């Protein structure tokens, strides 16, 4: 068993975070070899003089990210992430920041397209959102401030990549919240992810072959096919997209959602992320990271972005404010590697930015004034309560169904252990006035061709329902599926 001596400092960082950071660094640097058993949570907590729950929270976060593996009745073991030893973390940051300066001188809502809630019955829609807590007064005030400049500057044509002020704020936000180091000149703003994917197609000189997980965000697949790209489904397992399938696919791009895969809810462990990065580097390919709902995680810290591991600039990071603020906030952004940034300026630099300049300035003020962070904290707490409420209300189904995708995002995944077809499950739910959604509509390949069986799997979104509605709807599902 590996003996841990973790230094605790009074630097303002929580005890759990210090334990987590220390063990992660030891594994990354190869000081804790793969398969090494770590002290139990009880032993480590007693040795450090901290509560067991503090150690447990750190261990859980390390397991979620793939640095530790929990083996029933045996304990916690360091995962096999040998390739991480070849990454120079501080050097990587320095190189990226230097690249930002050099280029400056030179000049991430997912969710299937689902009919809106009709107000009849209980609809566990995946596209639902709680807008009752939107800070309308603050937003109205910021709009007035933006238009108070009577010079009319806000109505003039802006820069192609988007407002520099907003791009600067986004780059700083990504550094603090997602571990992504980029300069504002790498950020391209557009009206929605669909536009950014179409723009990327032109940057790459499309059409190109794009690998996607066999169960995925099908709206992105439709967009890619609509602009002429060839979408190749790739096998996935319990850790997400399989790197071996990428090699066989012969793709130039791979579209992934590593922090919370839609719709399965899988969190890709760090070892698999390194495999994908190695494939991209060896194949002269790129990874599109769709980080659509990373803000909503209910246990521990947010999972770091795949882009935070990217030292060879093979990741194109896409984010959006549609999920974090409101669906109508059609402002998305893309972080381009420097090589693609040069191509963008050469091929697409003459395009006007599709996101209205006034909206960008309002959003910049919203983030700069701290309102965005406060809104996120409020909504995270609200969605966590609804998440916990739904899990509790579904507890009578725990023996009949496997429940996954919890502790992140705004939907849960239920799979019938007895293998009933999703059509039967959704029909039984409809008889009780409840709408749930089968996973088959998110699959890119026919059932007979998939290696992983998703039989009897349904999805329940909870963002658009109150806790009372969640309890009533879940109770009706228990009645429908247990009798």
Image: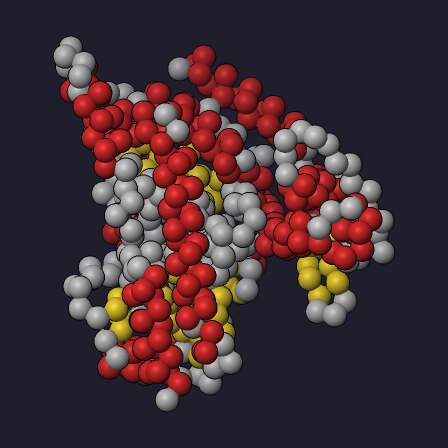
- State the image coordinates of residue 359 (x, y, percent, origin top left): 23, 30
Picture quadrant of residue 426: bottom left
Horizontally, is 344 left or right of 352 in the view? right
Residue located 61% across and 23% down the image: 94
- State the image coordinates of residue 446 (x, y, percent, origin top left): 37, 73
In which quadrant will I find the C terminus? bottom left
Residue located 33% across and 56% down the image: 463
Please tell me which residue lies in front, 264 or 226.
264
Please tell me which residue lies in front, 208 or 337.
337
- State the image coordinates of residue 135 (x, y, percent, origin top left): 28, 37
**Above or below, 481 relative to 349:** below
Picture quadrant of residue 450: bottom left
Picture quadrant of residue 153: top left
**Above or below, 315 relative to 72:** above
Please tell me which residue lies in front, 252 or 63.
63
Please tell me which residue lies in front, 312 or 264.
264
Is residue 119 visible from the viewing direction of this image? yes
Is residue 448 visible from the viewing direction of this image? no
């Amino acid at each position: 068993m590996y003996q841990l001596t973790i230094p605790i400092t009074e630097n303002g960082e929580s005890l759990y975070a210090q334990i987590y950071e220390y063990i992660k660094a030891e594994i990354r640097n190869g000081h804790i070899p793969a398969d090494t058993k770590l002290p139990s949570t009880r032993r480590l907590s007693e040795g450090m003089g901290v509560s067991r729950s503090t150690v447990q929270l750190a261990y859980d976060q390390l397991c979620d990210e793939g640095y530790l593996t929990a083996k029933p009745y045996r304990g916690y073991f360091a995962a096999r992430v040998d390739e991480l030893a070849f990454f120079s973390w501080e050097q990587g940051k320095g190189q990226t920041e230097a690249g930002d300066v050099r280029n400056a001188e030179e000049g991430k809502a997912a969710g299937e397209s689902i009919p809106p809630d009709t107000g009849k019955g209980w609809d566990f829609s995946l596209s639902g959102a709680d807008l009752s807590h939107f800070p309308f007064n603050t937003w109205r005030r910021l709009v007035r401030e933006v238009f108070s400049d009577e010079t009319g500057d806000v109505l003039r044509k802006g820069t192609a990549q988007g407002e520099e002020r907003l791009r600067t704020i986004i780059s700083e936000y990504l550094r603090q919240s997602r571990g992504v180091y980029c300069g504002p000149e790498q950020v391209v703003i557009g009206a929605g992810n669909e536009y950014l994917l179409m723009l990327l197609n032109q940057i790459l000189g499309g059409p190109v072959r794009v690998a996607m997980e066999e169960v995925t965000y099908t709206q992105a697949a439709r967009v890619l096919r609509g602009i002429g790209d060839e979408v190749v489904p790739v096998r996935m397992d319990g850790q997400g997209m399989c790197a071996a399938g990428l090699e066989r696919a012969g793709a130039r791009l791979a579209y992934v959602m590593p922090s919370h895969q839609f719709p399965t809810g899988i969190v890709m462990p760090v070892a698999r992320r390194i495999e994908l990065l190695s494939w991209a580097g060896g194949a002269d390919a790129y990874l599109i990271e769709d980080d659509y709902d990373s803000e909503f995680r209910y246990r521990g810290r947010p999972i770091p972005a795949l882009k935070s591991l990217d030292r060879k600039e093979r990741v194109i990071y896409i984010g959006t404010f549609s999920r974090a603020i409101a669906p109508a906030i059609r402002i998305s952004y893309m972080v381009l590697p420097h090589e693609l940034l040069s191509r963008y300026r050469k091929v697409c630099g003459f395009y006007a930015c599709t996101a209205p300049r006034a909206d960008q300035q309002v959003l910049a003020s919203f983030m700069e004034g701290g309102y965005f962070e406060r809104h996120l904290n409020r909504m995270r707490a609200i969605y966590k309560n609804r998440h916990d409420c739904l899990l509790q209300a579904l507890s009578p189904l725990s023996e009949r169904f496997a429940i996954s995708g919890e502790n992140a995002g705004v939907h849960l995944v239920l799979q019938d252990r007895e293998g009933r077809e999703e059509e039967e499950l959704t029909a039984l739910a409809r008889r009780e006035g409840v709408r749930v959604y089968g996973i088959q509509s998110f699959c890119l390949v026919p059932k007979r061709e998939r290696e992983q069986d998703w039989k009897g799997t349904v999805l329940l979104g909870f963002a658009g329902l109150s806790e009372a509605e969640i309890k009533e709807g879940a109770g009706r599902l228990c009645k429908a599926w247990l009798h």
